[in-house]
Image (cartoon, rainbow, N blue to C red):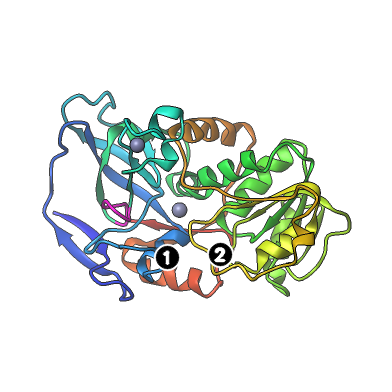
Amino acid sequence: MMRAMILTEVGRPLRLLDRPDRLPGAGEARLSVLACGVCRTDLHVVDGELANVRTPIIPGHEIVGVVDSVGEGVSLAVGERVGVGWLGRTCGVCAFCRSGRENLCDTPEFTGYTRDGGFATHAIVDARFAYPLAAAGTPADQAPLLCAGLIGWRSLVFAGAGKRLGIYGFGAAGHIIAQVARWQGRQLFVFTRPGDGAAQDFARRLGAHWVGGSDEAPPAPLDAAIVYAPAGELVPAALRAVGKGGRVVCGGIHMSDIPSFPYEILWGEREVVSVANLTRKDAHEFLAVAPEAGVRTLVTLYPLEAANDALADMRSGRLTGAAVLVP
Ligand SMILES: [Zn+2]
Ligand SMILES: [Zn+2]
């Protein structure tokens, strides 16, 4: 039997349930889960803020596990440590898949949303979407890299090469990408909830050049800004913070409505773009960059059974860094 924290009804707490063991099918691998990060998207799934949540579903898409059995045609080795993120499977044949944009696949599967994820002792995954991880690392420290890190990385690439980078929302993705941006030699401007001293101190410790509330203006115009917080009102705020030709990248899968804003803050060839999901190429790139950049994650551990507490702490903004479940 495997144990899992399962969403049986949207808007209700997860329930700890036993599930019969299943063997991996062709192309699949079964992982013994070592750690699984808790991402804001899990909260959006549980709270029903994403459309068409399928229940029952096991959330969790920052899985670090050891391959304990493989199906036919799988090249992963039993005993190998791998990570699995949000992109659970793509069709491989649609126009997006065929043009290097599998993140936009027409019929994708997403881990912990349309297929079972990692809030469990075991997970069955499509082996093509499992990425090798260094066996020397601490599993709980690696978990946040698999979504906060990967989507964070895609957002950073979308932000362009500008030196003066703003980050709105300094949670799991923010604190990882801040380290990569510093390593790239960028100047970092971090915007937190007004008065969030803990997040502001944390950003300073990670080398931010300037730290302030999201209601403040940076000391000089930015080249680009990434909005990781799911708050639509930050988009006009970020547009006001970037200079001519500046780009605002929305890194979240869900955001509250963006309030209307005067055209003049978009004028000057400023851009607003969203980043959707990720490709396997993003994953391989980032998982190589992270150790090179010396990325360290700040994690708060919870036992698997305490998944609801982790979600509640994230919902209330009590977390610093990333939450990780350990079965
Ligand atoms: Zn496709
Ligand atoms: Zn995520």
Q: Residue at x 31, y 74 (%)?
A: 13
Query: Which secondary structure dominates the residues rendered in magenta?
Result: loop
Residue 238 screen position, x and y as percent: 72, 59
Query: Total label count?
Result: 2
Residue 95 screen position, x and y as percent: 39, 33
Judge left or right: residue 230 versus residue 233: left
Of 92 and 57, which appears nearest the observer? 92
Report the image quarter containing ligand 1. top left
Q: Residue at x 43, y 33 (%)?
A: 280
Judge left or right: residue 273 versus residue 90: right
Q: Secondary structure at mark 2?
A: loop
Mark 1 and mark 2 in contact (Cβ < 8 Å)? yes
Residue 50 screen position, x and y as percent: 39, 63
Of 113 and 105, which appears nearest the observer? 105
- 97 relative to 107, above or below: above
Magenta stretch?
112-119
The label number, if any, that marks residue 44 in the structure image: 1
The label number, if any, that marks residue 230 in the structure image: 2
Q: Secondary structure at mark 1?
A: helix
Q: Is mark 2 within 8 Å of ligand 2?
A: no
